Amino acid sequence: MPLSPDPLFKPFSLKNLKLANRIVMAPMTRSFSPGGVPGADVAAYYRRRAESEVGLIITEGTVIDHPASTNDPRVPHFHGEAALAGWARVASEVHAAGGKIMPQIWHVGTVRRMGDRPNPEAPPIGPSGLYKPGVKVVEPMSEAEIAAVIAAYARAAADAKRLGFDGVELHGAHGYLIDQFFWEGTNQRSDRYGGDLLARTHFAVEVIQACRRAVGADFPIVLRFSQWKQQDYGARLASTPELLAKFLAPLVDAGVDVFHCSTRRFWEPEFEGSALNLAGWTKKLTGKPVITVGSVSLDTDMFAAFRGEGAAVTSIDKLIEMIAREEVDLVAVGRALLVDPAWAAKVHAGRMQDLLPFTPEALRSLS
């Protein structure tokens, strides 16, 4: 018999954020916002998940007010009157359904290519102009450019609070701009924004501090980070718990409330000699609440979906045990919620047999 799902449905509170349960909708790029403006269909998409007992929704990545922040004209903006009005509607719909919601704010850095729309004239930016080790695509960012981007993050955080969102997540993972400062492979600077692992957190620290000033003490700030990069799935920021502790400490001091620890498979241990995954280690080292993520209730990771492959339903017993032992606090569910808006309600009712397998068609639908 499967374990009782009750641990997943215990309330969770942090500052002014009060969640009915531990289930989070993971941020997933959807590219369904023409001109960067989320429409009524996007609001309805998120509302359906809130209506079916998802405690917290973290939106798809939304780009900050910088011309090189995006490489896709259908990725939503988190700036400009029309886009922000669209996001205000999204937040209102989710709240009306009893849910909570945070935008994930994002800059793609040197993942962008020259000529990418919607701003083909804007060159990509990155700490050292590198897309990955040995592949330089542009000159390093100047300190003036760094200051402008930090200010854009802070404006987005302030807008999130003004529009009534319940917090904000900074996208610091997967080889995008903040992560390009973290990763030695893309940060070869010799000024205060580069150097050893501790020094390479300096850009993120300034972003977090600027956002904290913009939103005040009680508005939650989440940071998503990852060891792996889209440029190198085997990359690691920290190869030992000691290095991970060194990396996390300045981010805690800067004002992060929750760490969203991105892994491809939540059940995999992070370091030899311990069963803890990346989120478990992060909580142990910082004492901060953590979100775990990665192939929840599915038997293949997300990259199988990008290859056009489906995934079968599998047990969540290990996840329930991790929550019950308080190794992790929250769990982000991705593809399973794309294919089945009622996933959380089914799990709560013990209807594991009714969960749907993932099919790649879900990537092309805003259902």
Image: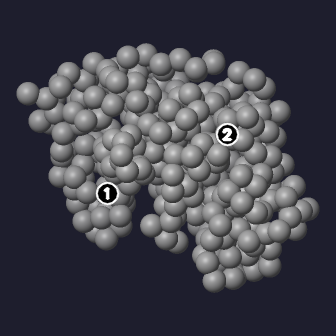
On screen, residue 139 versus residue 276, left or right, reads right
Which residue, given by chain and number where applicable, does mark 1 sit on? 301
Q: Which residue is mark 2?
A: 249
Identified at 23% across, 60% down, the residue is 310
On the rendered structure, is 343 left or right of 197? left
The quarter of the picture where residue 353 lies is: top left
Quadrant assignment, res 165: top right
Judged from the image, the secondary structure of the residue bearing numbered disc 2 is helix
Answer whether labels 1 and 2 touch (C-beta < 8 Å). no
Label 1: state its secondary structure: loop
**One can see residue 222 in this view:** yes
Residue drawn where x is 85% and y is 58% of the image: 192
Residue 207 location (% of width, % of height): 77, 46
At x 25%, y 24%, the residue is 5
Judge by depth and name the residue closer to the eye, 133 or 58. 133
238 vs 257: above or below: below
Q: Residues within 10 Å of mark 1 (few under 14, many from 20)?
A: some
1 vs 2, front mark: 2
In x, y percent, where is residue 330? 43, 31
First in residue order: circle 1 vs circle 2: 2
The kind of residue on which mark 2 rests is Ala
